[in-house]
Amino acid sequence: MKKIIYLLALPLFFAACGQAPKTAEEAGEVKQATAEAAVFTVDTEGSMLKWEGAKITETVHNGTVSITEGSLAFAGDQLEAGSFTVDMNTLVVLDLTEETGKFKLEGHLKSGDFFQVENYPTAKFEVTGAEALSGDPAATHRISGNLTIKDVTNGISFPATVVVSESGVEANAKFEINRNEWGVLWGGTKTEQGIKDFLQNNLIKDMITFEVSLKANK
């Protein structure tokens, strides 16, 4: 009976596969701050990384992951270098309660099914380039960098709003990644997956949305 269900479901799952855009770029050389740069330390209490993922049934889950360290280096208002690290063990689901499966989903995402936090406890973003934008009401910069998840490093780029003042720096950005490009697969790698794991993996949409909010001080 289960085999019949899988076969009947295949057209739906294959229709959902292969449609997500490629988001990973070639990893670049990480920028280093010059001696003259003003370096700001990320305020881990005031900074946060939000995430959002969805199933093909349109069920959406969201939550946060804590930023544990980071810095941003500027020459004037131009971002020269920067990085931040997140603790994957702090991954929290916000849209569910204990009664509706909050702890179950958190454990599922942290387990070997997805992020394998026991083996890969941190993720990291490192700046490889920053271009100041003009005439864009939604962003001040386009930032490029290396994103490392589960020891897989790929380049990404995205628009961001970066404001430098005497009191510090505030940087905000929202971007998407295709989780497959970082090996975030239910059931291991694509070549290792059996039919059940393959179908389970494709119950989940490929794209993960991240929203990062950084506050940094001298």
Image: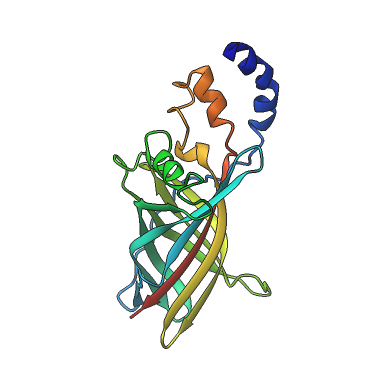
Q: Is residue 80 left or right of residue 156?
A: left
Residue sitting nearer the eye, 32 or 102:
102
Quarter of the figure with the N terminus: top right
* x, y percent for residue 120: 32, 43
Displayed quadrant of residue 30: bottom left
* x, y percent for residue 211: 53, 60
Residue sitting nearer the eye, 100 or 180:
100
Q: Is residue 116 above or below residue 216?
A: above
Displayed quadrant of residue 75: bottom left
Q: Is residue 59 left or right of residue 127?
A: right
Q: Residue at x 36, y 73 (%)?
A: 43
Tell me how the rendering is colored. Answer: rainbow
Q: Residue at x 67, y 35 (%)?
A: 19
Q: Is residue 26 above or below residue 95?
A: above
* x, y percent for residue 69: 32, 64
Quarter of the figure with the C terminus: bottom left
Q: Residue at x 44, y 81 (%)?
A: 76
